Image (cartoon, rainbow, N blue to C red):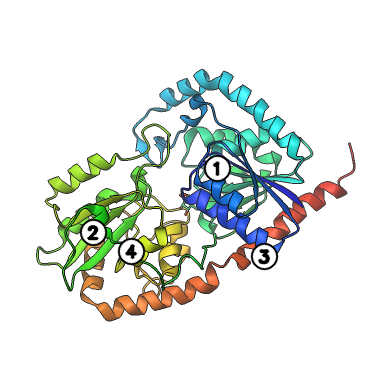
Amino acid sequence: MNLLFLNPAGSPGGAERALLDVMASLAAARPGWRLGLIAAADGVLVEEARAMGVDAAVVKFPRAVSLLGDAAAGGPAGDHTNPLAVAGRVAAAAPAIASYTRALRRAIAERAPDAIHTNGFKMHVLGAWAAPRATPLIWHLHDYVRARPMMSRLLRAHAGRTAAIIANSHSVADDARRLFGGRANVLAVHNAVDLERFSPAGHALDLDRLAGLPPLGEGGVRVGLMATLARWKGHRTFLRALADLPAHSPVRGYVIGGPLYETAGSQHALEDLRGYAGALGLDGRAGFTGFVADAPAALRALDIVVHASTEPEPFGLVIAEAMACGKPVIASAAGGAGELFADGSEALSHKPGDAAELARAIARLAADRALRLRLGAAAAAAARHRFTRARLAAELIPIYERAVGAKRTRPAA
Ligand code: GLC
């Protein structure tokens, strides 16, 4: 099997981390398969793919194409750009899109893959345009399609081209089925986590130093939100919850992460969040570490991990990663995130955007070390069987084999 992955970004956000696990799990389960990757930008994704033996190349998006996106035009990031502005940018980018499609077509032809797996909205569409007609195309959805006004139309128009559509949760799969109807075969496959990196034992970061805060005293409880700065990840909800805690609370909050996507208007600026924390009176009680490369070491440094997405979370890789590190998690339980843990015994949940409820859950866990340990241990045990790469490979391999087999048995035109 010669499998080619197409990814619109070069550095790892959630979808890219998930893709690395897909490639690693296939490399381990099917060492004879040839795995290739074309990414639209340089970065850690490409480096890490190469390190695991994937034949990775960069076919760079022209700037006009990398800036395109409707995440902020009535999509999950809210109405910070209007759809007309997005349509205008698409029109202006048309020549760049056409020349990129040609470059991608050449790069695909050189590799002559048996099947193509696209990972990200732009690559689903570009892949449909650039892939040879006879090559099975598999889309891997990491986000709700119907939340994207422009993309949902484009994807619906091309869904019939796919051999299969993989969704990262049942929730995302249901959303896709509602949009695509009978046009496509949608299958839910949960992500895996690298359980060797994300494990309870190992090095922990000095978050206080990274955030420029004095060391937290004996008895202090570290509570952190680790996410990209996408607006819907709930940074403000988290900060409001911290401000809701009583003044004598032992909790110190940490915002871990930095800006990632280039799409206009879809993310917070770190400075705005600092200003917001200041206005809430959180000086000294909340810190900002900026981007952290060693995610497991950041998670290990926390006593409680908060996930606070204000929109239904498609999957919520950080929840799975924190569970794998044996951490008690308080998750915003809507969407695919609710599929990852047994509520109350493997993690706690709160209503998306409800800072008061989140504050109550933080206060409860901060006061009860035994409960933290119990939840953390149950989470680690669940993660060790739910998020393995072996499970991921076992679910994916038949999807590729069926797609390629169906093509072989189809009579030649
Ligand atoms: C996207 C989703 C996130 C998921 C990740 C990996 O980033 O928004 O929920 O964890 O993809 O599938």
Q: Are the residues flagged by discs 2 and 4 in contact, CB closer than 8 Å?
A: no
Disc 3 or 4, which lies upstream in sequence? Answer: 4
From where the camera sits, is residue 188 visible? no
**Badge 4 is on which residue?**
305
Marks 3 and 1, how far apart in space? 22 Å
- Apparent side of residue 190 relative to residue 158 in the rendered image (left or right): left
- Residue 308 image position (x, y, % from top left): 33, 55
**Badge 2 is on which residue?**
208
Marks 1 and 2, how far apart in space? 35 Å
Indicate the amino acid at tag 2: Asp
- Apparent side of residue 309 relative to residue 217 in the rendered image (left or right): right
Q: Are the residues flagged by discs 3 and 1 in contact, CB closer than 8 Å?
A: no
Label 4 Cα crowd, 10 Å radius (few <14 / some 14-19 / many 20+): many
Task: Out of 200 and 321, give the one closest to the viewer.
Answer: 200
Q: What is the quadrant of the C terminus in the image? A: top right
Disc 3 or 2, which lies upstream in sequence? Answer: 2
Q: Are the residues flagged by discs 1 and 2 in contact, CB closer than 8 Å?
A: no
Indicate the amino acid at tag 1: Gly
Mark 3 lies on a secondary structure that is: helix
The residue lying at 34 percent from left, 32 percent from top is 80
Disc 3 or 1, which lies upstream in sequence? Answer: 1
Indicate the amino acid at tag 3: Ala
Closest to the camera, between mark 1 and mark 2, is 2
Mark 4 lies on a secondary structure that is: strand
Disc 2 or 4, which lies upstream in sequence? Answer: 2
Marks 2 and 4, how far apart in space? 16 Å
**Badge 1 is on which residue?**
120
Indicate the amino acid at tag 4: Val
**Badge 3 is on which residue?**
394
- Residue 222 image position (x, y, % from top left): 25, 65
The residue lying at 18 percent from left, 42 percent from top is 275
The residue lying at 65 percent from left, 50 percent from top is 54
